[in-house]
Image: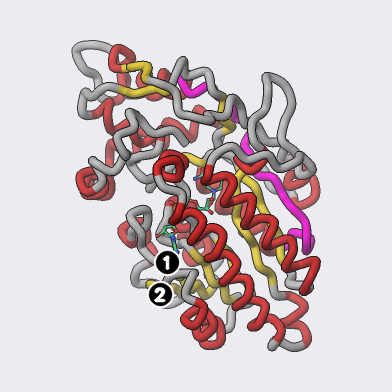
């Protein structure tokens, strides 16, 4: 099995690459531009593996993509490359339109040309998995869950750009027959998460005794999924998902942001005790514009049809995550220092 992964140096992409290279023993080519969000230090575990290759390239560069597809001859494309940070999209949407919309379009066109040239079983078995977010569905009230048939209603430039890319991918199946599958997942957390995102930001600020900035009253609800559970789900969806279908991915772990931060503080109190409880560092700051109230995923289709289940609960996953950041300063310290000023003047980052 030969898999071309885009965005494999990012948070989720690197978990996917580690899973495919080390557990599944697939031949993997990782195509990544290495923006601020991509780092090969997340891929040290696969660095020397004979079944892993890396190509630094932009998914907007159709010529390079076409050549790469012809050379590598993948059985599958797993498309994760994206601009992914909501706060950054609010402060400047251009890169989001460039990569998420134009980049996805470019990749689709190259994939279509490549797939058209395949024959027989290889053509039949080829899959293009587009990895997307539950943010395309907009916001929920206190009740209900996002299902695969929930209407799109994105709130931020980020989610609007992902919604656009989802529509392009679906249209390439309906119009040209490209065998695509789409996955929409809730918020991920876990090791190798970029230091500006909510959970790592809180852990690292706590470690350094800095304020823990929580948007508004912190009552926004997110449905958290451990990143390695997502990586396994993506492999299963790419392998067995039905062409043209969407699969929602989520771990049934709804938590209010303030409760996530409080839980991190409680874990820190136990793992790295200090004179005063970490909870005292929590600081409420002005809310983000267009901040969605609640996301929650109904993942029953993926669970019943494809047999996937999340292995981590929020409690087990968050403890692993806090411990990982405590033990892996070599990974996060250079990123945190390089991008300390990159939070665009916003007081804190939310997923
Ligand atoms: P990330 O920001 O950590 O990583 C994105 C990767 O894409 C980086 O390695 C970056 O260098 C690369 N990239 C960006 N622009 C590129 C371009 N033009 N060409 C090639 N590579 C480029 O993102 P992530 O959190 O790992 O998310 C991966 C995918 O999963 C995204 O499509 C995102 O929308 C989706 N997703 C994320 C979450 C989440 O909670 N993080 C949840 C659901 C879906």
Q: Is the distance from the Cβ of mark 1 to the nearest ligand 1 atom less than 8 Å?
A: yes
- Disc sitting over residue 247 in the figure: none
Is residue 245 a member of the stretch shown in magenta?
Answer: yes
Where does the magenta region start and end? 240-258
Depicted 133 relative to depicted 48: above or below:
above
First along the sequence among labels 2 and 1: 1
Q: Residues within 10 Å of mark 1 (few under 14, many from 20)?
A: many
Number of numbered discs present? 2
Above or below, 196 against 49 in this view is above
Q: Which residue is mark 2?
A: 55
Q: CA distance from mark 2 to mark 1?
A: 7 Å
Residue 108 in the image: state x and y as whole percent: 63, 71
Query: Residue drawn at (28%, 36%), measured in percent from left and top?
Result: 326
Q: In the image, is 288 to the left or to the right of 325?
A: right
The one of 333 and 133 positioned closer to us in this rendering: 133
Name the residue rendered at 57%, 71% in the picture. Answer: 107
**Dot 2 surroundings within 10 Å: few (below 14), some, or many (20 or more)?**
some
Q: Are marks 2 and 1 in contact (CB under 8 Å)?
A: yes
Judging from the image, what secondary structure is the residue with disc 2 in? Answer: strand
Name the element at disc 1.
Answer: strand
Residue 238 placement (x, y as % from top left): 67, 62
Q: Is mark 2 within 8 Å of ligand 1?
A: no
Question: What label sits on residue 32 in the rendered view?
Answer: 1
The quarter of the displayed image where residue 324 is located: top left
Judging depth in this view, the residue of 42 and 311 nearest the camera is 42
Q: Residue at x 47, y 49 (%)?
A: 84
Instruction: Report if residue 310 is visible in the image.
Output: no
> Could you tell me which residue is drawn at 37 percent across and 16 percent down?
284
């Amino acid at each position: 099995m030969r898999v071309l992964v885009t965005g494999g140096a990012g948070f989720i992409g690197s978990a996917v690459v580690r899973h495919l290279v080390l557990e599944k023993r697939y031949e993997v080519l990782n195509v990544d531009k290495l923006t601020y969000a991509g780092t090969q230090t997340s891929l040290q575990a696969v660095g020397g593996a004979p079944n892993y290759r890396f190509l630094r390239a932009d998914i907007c560069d159709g010529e390079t993509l076409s050549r790469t597809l012809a050379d590598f001859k993948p059985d599958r494309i797993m498309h994760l490359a994206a601009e992914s940070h909501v706060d950054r999209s609010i402060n400047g949407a251009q890169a989001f339109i460039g990569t998420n919309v134009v980049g996805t379009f470019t990749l689709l066109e190259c994939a279509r040309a490549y797939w058209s040239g395949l024959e027989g079983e290889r053509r039949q078995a080829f899959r293009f998995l587009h990895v997307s977010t539950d943010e395309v569905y907009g916001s929920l009230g206190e009740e209900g869950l996002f299902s695969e048939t929930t209407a799109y209603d994105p709130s931020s430039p980020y989610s609007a750009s992902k919604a656009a890319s989802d529509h392009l991918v679906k249209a390439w199946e309906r119009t040209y027959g490209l065998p695509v599958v789409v996955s929409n997942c809730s918020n991920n957390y876990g090791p190798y998460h970029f230091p500006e995102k909510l959970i790592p930001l809180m852990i690292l600020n706590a470690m350094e005794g800095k304020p823990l900035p929580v948007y508004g009253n912190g009552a926004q609800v997110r449905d958290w999924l451990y990143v390695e559970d997502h990586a396994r789900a993506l492999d299963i969806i790419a392998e067995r998902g039905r062409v043209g279908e969407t699969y929602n991915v989520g771990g049934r772990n709804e938590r209010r942001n303030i409760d996530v931060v409080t839980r991190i503080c409680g874990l820190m109190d136990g793992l790295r005790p200090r004179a005063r409880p970490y909870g005292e560092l929590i600081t409420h700051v002005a809310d983000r514009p267009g901040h969605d109230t609640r996301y929650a995923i109904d993942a029953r289709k993926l669970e019943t049809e494809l047999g996937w289940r999340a292995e981590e609960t929020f409690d087990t996953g968050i403890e692993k995550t806090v411990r990982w950041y405590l033990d892996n300063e070599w990974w996060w310290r250079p990123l945190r220092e390089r991008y300390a000023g990159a939070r665009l003047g916003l007081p804190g980052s939310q997923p």
